[in-house]
Image (cartoon, rainbow, N blue to C red):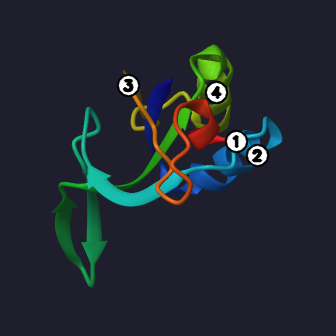
Amino acid sequence: MKKIEAIIRPEAFQTLKDGLSAVGISGLTVTEAAGCGKQQGKKGVFRGTSFEIQLVPRVKVEMVIEESRLDEIVDVIIDSCSTDTIGDGKIFISSIEEVIRIRSGERGKEAVL
């Protein structure tokens, strides 16, 4: 099994959620986040005063999937979230040794489905 963590723009989340739902992925953990990368924050003006925002709002989407679906899910994330500009986000993939559903004690892929 693999864990996918995608850090994306907040405005891309609904499109991503719809895309994942269309391929049968409904189990997600979503967290509001903030960060900066190459875009180094952004500048704004409030009541005539300039200021710099060091951290940009992001959404972190996490899911655990069967390894056989990895490429399919990564393609959905890229298709849903890419604007071809700096700040589209990152995808992190890591291995999961075991999953256990607390309620039933199910293990492995049965606990993920």
In the image, what residue occupies the spot 21% across and 60% down?
Answer: 53
Please, what secondary structure does the residue beneath circle 2 have?
helix
Label 4 and label 3: CA atoms lie apart by 19 Å
Quadrant of the rendered image containing residue 16 = top right
Label 2 and label 4: CA atoms lie apart by 11 Å
Give the amino acid type for the residue marked by disc 1 in the picture: Ile
Q: In this view, does 79 lie to the left or right of 57?
A: right
Label 1 and label 4: CA atoms lie apart by 9 Å
Above or below 96: residue 58? below
Label 1 and label 2: CA atoms lie apart by 5 Å
Q: Is disc 3 in contact with disc 1, using a CB cutoff of under 8 Å? A: no
Q: Residues within 10 Å of mark 3 (few under 14, many from 20)?
A: few
Task: Give the x, y percent position of residue 86.
Answer: 40, 32
Task: Give the x, y percent position of residue 6.
Answer: 45, 38
Please, what secondary structure does the residue beneath circle 3 have?
loop
Q: Mark 3 points at which residue?
A: 97
Q: Residue 21 carries which label?
A: 2
Quadrant of the rendered image containing residue 11 = bottom right
Q: Is disc 1 in contact with disc 2, using a CB cutoff of under 8 Å? A: yes
Label 3 and label 1: CA atoms lie apart by 20 Å
Q: Is disc 1 in contact with disc 4, using a CB cutoff of under 8 Å? A: yes
In the image, what residue occupies the spot 59% across and 40% down?
Answer: 112
Give the amino acid type for the residue marked by disc 3 in the picture: Glu
In this rendered view, identify the residue nearer to me: 86 or 44: 86
Above or below 17: residue 90? above
Q: Residue 25 carries which label?
A: 1
Q: Residues within 10 Å of mark 4 (few under 14, many from 20)?
A: some
Mark 3 or 1 closer to N-term?
1
Above or below 102: residue 87? above
Q: Mark 4 points at which residue?
A: 73
Q: How many numbered markers are drawn?
A: 4
Give the amino acid type for the residue marked by disc 2 in the picture: Ser
